[in-house]
Image: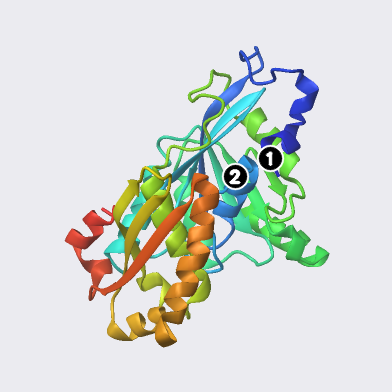
Amino acid sequence: MTPGDLLNLEDFGPDPLGEVGPDHHSGFVAVVGRPNVGKSTLMNALLGQKIAIVSPRPQTTRNRITGILTTPQMQAVFLDTPGIHEPRHRLGEFMLGEALAALPDADLILWVVDVSKPPQPDDQRVAAILAGLPLPTLLAMNKIDITPAADLLAHSAAYRGLVPNAVADIAFSALTGQGMAALADLLHAHLPPGPRFFPPDQVSDIQERFLVAELVRERALLYLRQEVPHAVAVDIQEFTRRENGVIYIVAHIYVERDSQKGILLGAQGGMLKRIGAAARQEIEANLDSPVYLQLWVKVKPGWRRDPAVLRRLGYA
């Protein structure tokens, strides 16, 4: 799916992204919700490009990520945030702070929920936060592709009850695209009139080194056992474009215990090689360049509670 799929850009003539018209709307959209409801999947689908990593693990997103959707009628600047949850360590406190910090900058809140399940305690926590904000909220109920009809009716009513002042609500699937065009229409309707803030061909403001670290972490999240992924962090030590066109990357993968290091390495280094090979393919596709990727595993006990390490990793 691309922005063109959402709003049929071919219908606007040879230069659909030229000067904005009188009905052009723009603004900042804070994408919030509890962990693992599909916020990053939704933003990637709207943009037609992967800028935020996704995995089945909760709390995959750790930093606030900006994504920019530009169409002839709208420029929506998404602030994809970590899932709102009860923090258990300094990293969790940082992630919660990232989510809450996006709210004052927003013109519209896009509250994403997993409608395949009834409201959870963290959903109620989000609702309590939003209730105290003077901002319009759009209730976005994701995962209708896996929700039986009877559950959809009951669960959607329960979520509407949590946010009775929502400007609108919509059920959709970020995975299959069902309902996404209607969601884009709602975004246009509820963003204020205004100009573009970014060039029309810009889809994000993230830096290449950050993207590379996130793509390596994504592979670790997908391949490792349940007890390891949240203890993983990636630090880019070297990022060099060489004369032959190859990008040379050295990254350290941090874990908290020796046992986690052993799982990450795998038998004869097999797991680390698997992570590296898959990450390299993703990095090459995103940077459109050949890549040499070298990974090292380091143990930093309790790094999620260490302010100095968190600052170095950009989590403070």
Q: Are marks 2 and 1 in contact (CB under 8 Å)?
A: yes
> Looking at the rendered structure, which numbered label has been put on residue 95?
none
Q: Nearer the viewer, residue 153 or 80?
A: 80
Residue 198, percent from left and from top: 49, 25
**Residue at the far front in the pictured view:** 244
Using residue 19 as the reference point, say whether residue 144 is left or right of it.
right
Mark 1 surroundings: few (<14), some (14-19) or many (≥20) residues within 10 A: some
Q: Residue at x 74, y 39 (%)?
A: 181
Q: In the current view of this chain or complex, which residue is farthest to the left?
A: 308
What separation in Å lies between label 2 and label 1 (alpha carbons)?
7 Å
Tell me which label, 2 or 1, sits earlier in the chain.
1
Badge 1 marks a residue whose secondary structure is: loop
Kindly state the secondary structure of the residue where label 2 is placed. loop
Give the image quarter of residue 142.
Answer: bottom right
Residue, x 34% and y 62% (percent of image)? 234
Is 84 in front, or is 251? 251
Q: Amino acid at mark 1?
A: Thr
- In the image, residue 271 above or below residue 194: below
User: Where does the N terminus fall, quadrant-wise?
Assistant: top right
Q: Which residue is mark 1?
A: 2
Q: Is residue 258 left or right of residue 143?
A: left
Place residue 256 in its image quadrant: bottom left
Q: Which mark is residue 49?
A: 2
Q: Amino acid at mark 2?
A: Gln
Residue beneath the point at 49% across and 46% down: 289
Where residue 145 appears, x then y in whole percent? 76, 61
Q: Point out residue 310 in the picture as x, y percentages from the top left corner.
A: 25, 59
Residue 164 visible to an observer of this rendering: no
